[in-house]
Amino acid sequence: MADSVVTFVLDHLSELVAREAHLLYGVEDRIQSLQNELQMINDLLNTSKSKKGIDNTVVNQIRDVAHLAEDVIDTFVAKVAIYKRRTMLGRMLHGFAQARLLHDVADKVNKIKTTLNEIRENKDKYDAFEEINNQSAAKEEEEKKRAQSLHKLRKNVEEEGVVGFVHDSNVVIKRLLEGGSNRKAVSIIGMGGLGKTTLARKVYNNSEVKQHFECRAWVYVSNECRVRELLLGLLKHLMPNFDQQCKDKKKGKKSSRASSNLSEEELKKLVRNKLESRRYLVVVDDLWKRQDWDEVQDAFPDNNRGSRILITSRLKEVALHTAHDLPYYLQFLSGEESWELFCRKVFRGEDYPSDLEALGKQMVQSCRGLPLSIIVLAGLLAYKEKSHREWSKVVGHVNWYLTQDETQVTDTVLKLSYDNLPRRLKQCFLYLGIFPEDFEIPVTPLLQKWVAEGFIQDTGNRDLDDIAEDYLYELIDRSLVQVAKVKTNGRLETCQVHDLLRDLCISESKEDKVFEVCTDNNILIPTKPRRLSIHSNMGNYISSSNNDHSCIRSLFFFDPRYSIYGTEWKWLSKGFKLVRVMEFSYIGLNKIPSNLGNFIHLRYLRIQETYFDFVPASILNLWNLQTIDIGYKRFVMPISFPIQIWKLKYLRHLNTARSIELQGNCSGAVERMWNLQTISSLLLNRQATSLIKKGTFPNLKRIGLRVTGEYEGELPKLLQSLQQQSSLLNELEIIFLSSYPGGFKLQELSQILEQFNCLTFLKIDNVFNLLTFALAFPPNVTELTLSKINSFIDEGMNGLGNLTKLKILRLSGNRCYFGNSFELNCLAGSFPQLEVFEMEYLNLGKWKLGNGAMLRLQSVIINNCETLDDLPSKLWSLNGLRKVQVMKPSHQMATMLENMEINNRVQLVTEC
């Protein structure tokens, strides 16, 4: 990771020189010289054929010196920034200190350059670069030992009567046996240790599969694929006496050649010849690279006999490249399957003491359904005394036992996935270890943190958040990250990592000084990390830890039992002056102090529990700030922000659960916020309307507007300004705060909304009688939410039904309104692309579907529509329908659904 550290420091220095050169006044030449030295070190790292060939001591030296250089420059910049904020008198009084600071930083930079020069010029320390080839034997021996360990673990998992995989094997067998006569590839993917090989072996040995295929062969690939060895392995399956035949031929005719002398093409030809005339099944196990498949696939002839190739891989891109059908995603074992596998390995069919069941199930639960973990754990316990006393020692420490040298679960199986990652993804993956065990990681904040940390390289053409999202999907496709929750629109909401992978992240990060996780167990161990994630009680940490926090760039608190007051803020501002990312998850915050502006390197600030009503003006000093993410929707009152927020010229996201109320004098010149993409909730007042009219937000992608009765009349003009200035705007939320909006004509609002051609997401809250008019909506909207509906008429619904790109529609009534019920009529051919339809608290008497309406509907969710007693008969005939969920139905509706016979493809969920 030393190369990543050096690259990051170089990027950081370049950014400082380009953006804030005035803060480097007096040391510019030394900074430039330091950049040159770091660049030479970076080139040396990048041009080496193998980082493993560099002596580990040298790598650590390079990393530590790069960190030191970053600390020196960042500390200098922070002090200069505070100095420049002083009055003229203050600068005069501190002039001597400033001169001493310049001399001090110049001296430190010179020493760093000397150290870098010594590292670079010391030939002995870089002998490894020239001697990589001499180390190949040792490296091969290491790989051989790892392969042997992996083979041993695989044999432990693979057994004849394997537990689980009943449904999985049926699906895979069906895919293999069905289809046309052309050769077809079928793939199984999942994380390391999930049982892909075990499943493939179960399918391979299935009696029906044996009868169907005249010829079967199995070849193991691995991440170090050697085509020649792969082909020889196939031939040993296809020609059991292949080696002996080659030896016999070698002794006979002169033209005969030993297998060792055959070329790859000759070996391929032999494989083809053996497969050509038979219906065959070949298992290609543990495929890592697309190019490996490309090199061997022509050995498998398409003989028009229904031959099949079964591929296992951890990588989705490999599976998609090789197989004709979508990959089969292998799932974790259920609780019952996990317990059965554990018992089979530990007790070997014998009865077990009843007092061990609770402990055993607790340990098995810690394995999170990963077969490899269960097998290894069972192997450890099988040879221990089967007593409550012995098993109690293991409970709570399962992961520790699983990752010890003798088990090699992490090194042998899981670390392969990490080692195989491209450099750009390694830091992103390791970062996931900062979160607590079993934590569902919110995706949007995660991506914004990656950007703030500098993990995402700016290509100049694409948005950094989009690149970060691509990185996350790539980690998911590599079976390193699990999808936890998906939004209705298909976007990821939360993700997770398996406990063993999280442990891998923590161990690798500790070794490379990426981050430290502090718990109650290690709170007294002295460390000096770059990033610190505190999972213990914050009060205990502050009172107990003597760690040096001066170099920390990222700080996370995950203690839900604490609130921050003045003492804690004093501790933070004193010890964490260089912090770039700061997150308080679940920690209550009663006030943001006025000295917040001293964290001048801060790029990301997330505070989940908020009890304060204003953000101090000192936030405007945070010129690096990219993301502000504040609060739950616990309070109605807005949060006050200074109107000069436009001074935060690098701000990208302003996310608040409560609405933002800009305050202060808005006269004079205003700079445009070119980088701002998100304002989650802006209360319209004099200040907000002024900034919108002045075009302060030219590149917004998302904005939420809270409209009071006083500013309803301004809304059409403000929307028009946004439409003309923010050409990228694709998400708009409008919430009317008055009881009955009436400060403008609804037709006027409709005409303006229709002009938002780029808008794909629209939400209007408190619409009341909006749907009692024939209105038009943005033509390209795909997701529409309308809430607090009192009634609607056919003309209003027709406007919605004519939206040709609408995929998600949410209609919500007013739970406090008890007027007459009304009908929902969907005309013939309406809602042509709608996939998800949600209704709640609607005072519906009848829902009618015309011919050809909602043809693509997949999911219906109805909640608390207590006057709706029936569903349209045409609903059940829709071919794409997959789920109907009805919550709090009327008695008549519940009875009807209970007695209804529906197609097996539709999942019906009723919650009374």
Image: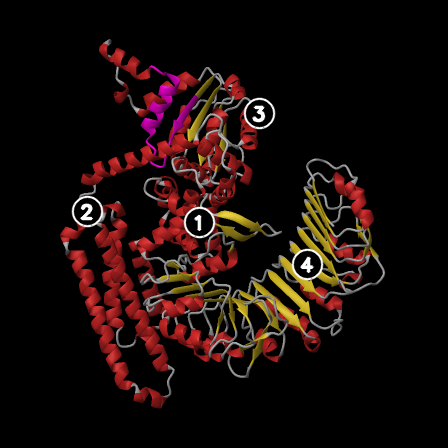
Dot 4 falls on a residue whose secondary structure is strand
Instruction: Give the Cα separation between the discs numbered 4 and 3.
Output: 43 Å
Q: Quadrant of residue 318?
A: top left
Q: In this view, which residue lies farthest toward the top?
A: 252
Which three-letter amino acid code belongs to the residue tagged 2? Ala
Q: Which residue is mark 1?
A: 396
* Number of residues whose C-alpha sits closer than 10 Å to that of mark 1, classed few (under 14), some (14–19) or many (20 or more): few
Q: Is residue 390 visible?
A: yes
Task: Identify the residue at horizontal 36%, vertical 22% (top origin).
Answer: 268
Q: Which residue is mark 4?
A: 785
Instruction: Give the Cα separation between the discs numbered 1 and 3.
Output: 46 Å
Q: Which residue is mark 2?
A: 128
Q: Is 866 situated left or right of 447 in this image?
A: right
The label on residue 620 is none
Which three-letter amino acid code belongs to the residue tagged 3? Glu
Q: Is residue 599 visible?
A: no
* Number of residues whose C-alpha sits closer than 10 Å to that of mark 3, classed few (under 14), some (14–19) or many (20 or more): few
